[in-house]
Every structure is written in structure tokens, then in C-alpha cells.
Image (cartoon, helix red, strand yellow):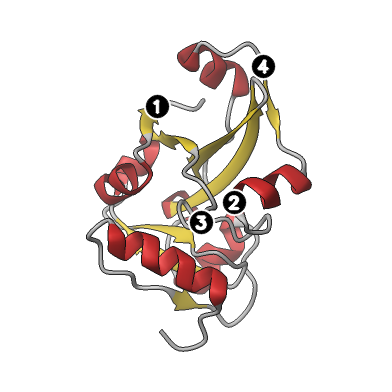
Amino acid sequence: MVGVNERNALVANAVASAGIEPAITILDADAKTAAAAAAQLGCEVGAIANSLVFECDGQPLLVMASGAARVDTDVVADHLGATAIRKAAPKLVRAATGQIIGGVAPVGHPEPLRTVVDQTLAAYPVIWTAAGTADSVMPLTYAQLLTLTAGLALAVR
């Protein structure tokens, strides 16, 4: 993995520990949006798994959502039995993940995060997630993403 840094290495180690071969790709430019990542990868925007951190009843919640979907926090709150879900402040994102917005990977965090995985991602044979930095991505299957995160498969809209 040429060009990987410490954050990428943490992600790669977490992926390998789950029995999945890490395949981190360093992009030519930052891909802080699903559209930017899809353009560089030559895939559909829906195959990009956005890593969105929310504050759910005072705790961080990672939602892995299709780049083609908007998360309906009311729907997610109802499914989780939560009273309040709101977009996390950048400071909470960094503290919970050790990564910056635009580069949050599904794993490689200081502590595992409660995770919801958008069911619409199951429609893609390969999905792409950030790999710890804004210029890095990795391919996974939907099943691998669920296993890796111990995530709850959920309709998020």
C-alpha cells in the first residue's frame, strides 16, 4: 500500500484483524464527497458508503449511508429507540474516530462505534468506503461492511 499514512495503517490493521484483506487505494485528489469519490473511481455515487457521524442520545453513532441517500434521522431514531439524533460536531467526529470529516473509515477508531449500515448499499457488489483520510478509499462487500463494523442493517430514509 504505497502512500499510506498512520491513519490508513490503523484502518488496514482493523480490516486485517477481521479476516478481510485490506486494499486501500490512495486517490489522486481528496474525495470529501461521494460524487468526488465516484468520479475518481468510475463507479456510481450510490456505491460510495458515506461515513456519517451523529450524536445519538449523547453518544457517537456511525451511519454508513449510500452516497445516493440522505439519512432521515427521525427514521433512524425510531428504529434505534433513540430520543435525539443530530449531526455530530467536527470535534466529536475527531474524538470518536481519530479521523477527519471526509475521511472517516468504518473502522480504525480509538473504540468501536455503534454503527448503522444503509440497506441500499446491498444493491452494489462492491462498495467503497473512506480509509482514514480524505484521499483514501477501500473496496468492501456489503457483507464485509456489516461484519467489519458489527453494524445494524437498516433503512436510513
Kindly state the secondary structure of the residue where label 2 is placed: helix
Instruction: From the top left corner, tell me how far across and down residue 68 is, in percent.
Output: 52, 44
Say which amino acid is labelled 2: Thr
Instruction: From the top left corner, tell me how far across and down residue 129 is, in percent.
Output: 46, 58
Say which amino acid is labelled 1: Leu
Q: Which residue is mark 4?
A: 84
Give whichever of 28, 68 is nearer the camera.
28
Q: Nearer the viewer, mark 4 or mark 2?
A: 2
Q: Which residue is mark 3?
A: 105
Kindly state the secondary structure of the residue where label 1 is placed: strand
Q: Which residue is mark 1?
A: 154
- Mark number, residue 97: 2
Q: Is residue 107 above or below residue 147?
A: below
Q: Distance between the Cα atoms at labels 1 and 4?
A: 17 Å
Can you say which quadrant of the picture contains the N terminus?
bottom left
Q: Distance between the Cα atoms at labels 1 and 2?
A: 21 Å
Mark 3 or 1, nearer chain start? 3
Give whichever of 44, 92 is nearer the camera.
92
